[in-house]
Image (cartoon, helix red, strand yellow):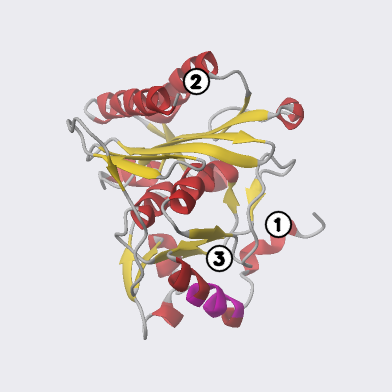
Amino acid sequence: MIEEIVKLAVRAGTIIEEVRNSPFSVEQKGSMGPVTEADHRADAFLKTELPKVVDGGWLSEETADNDERLSKELLWVVDPLDGTKEFVEGVPQYSVAVALVKKGEPILGVVHNPANGETVWAEKGKGAFFRERGAGREEPVAVSDGRIVLASRSEMKRGEFRPFEADWEIQPVGSIEYKLALIAMGRGAATVSRGPKWEWDVCAGAIIVEEAGGVVTDAFGDRFRFNQEFPKVKGVIAGAPEAHARVVEMVRLMGQSDRMDEFAGR
């Protein structure tokens, strides 16, 4: 089944690149940022094709949410274009992210970067794998410790990575799902966001990092549980085990982000 999901994610990426190579308009979704025809077309394609593989509920950035998914044992969690801002700006760090969740736990995940053709995927208990565009075979991937932390550009501008400057090499990367894929491939030791993330921002990448030997938690060091009524998580910290532990301790000392206020009363 995973190979079929990989193919569908790559086909969604082809749709995204078709839009990128033609004139397209950009709209704003308020605080959720920009949206384009690429987002909508990729979402419509995946919403049609994924349920043909496995019949389950649906949670996606570009589809109106409803409570029906809460009663589903299986749930597709999809970000058809994670990193729309990078897509609009021509920065090749956006991705298609697809995950299948069973009883709150992801059982498979795929992250595909349409710009460079990189695809990373994992199934629970079977490891994580990587394939380049045009490659005939996949290669296993594993996390790698070190001092490289992958950072959000917007969070860097807010100064949230200043405490890391003394001991870490900070590298800005776009899509959070792509950051997680890079961590799984050993191209960074850790990534962190102290602000809330939607489930579709992290679900696919979370299982990929874990199957690559890493650790993924929220900003407080707690494990994720997906398909929640309020489908957001309290930040994300992911990395090789030692790097993850160091970042958790740093974030504990930094204190809670004021962006967590939206969880008040929940």
Are the residues flagged by discs 3 and 2 in contact, CB closer than 8 Å? no
- Count neighbours of disc 3 (C-alpha within 10 A) and say few if under 14, some if 14 to 19, many if 20 or more: many
Q: Amino acid at mark 2?
A: Leu
Q: Which mark is residue 194?
A: 3
- The range drawn in magenta is 246-252
Work out whether residue 28 can be spotted: no
Q: Residue furthest right?
A: 265
Majority secondary structure in the magenta region? helix
Q: Quadrant of residue 132?
A: top left
Q: Quadrant of residue 89?
A: top left
User: Could you tell me residue 79's position as x and y percent?
Assistant: 48, 36
Q: Is residue 198 above or below residue 8?
A: below
Q: Nearer the viewer, residue 181 or 251?
A: 181
Q: Amino acid at mark 3?
A: Arg
Secondary structure, mark 1, is helix
Are the residues flagged by discs 3 and 1 in contact, CB closer than 8 Å? no
- Which residue is under mark 1? 262
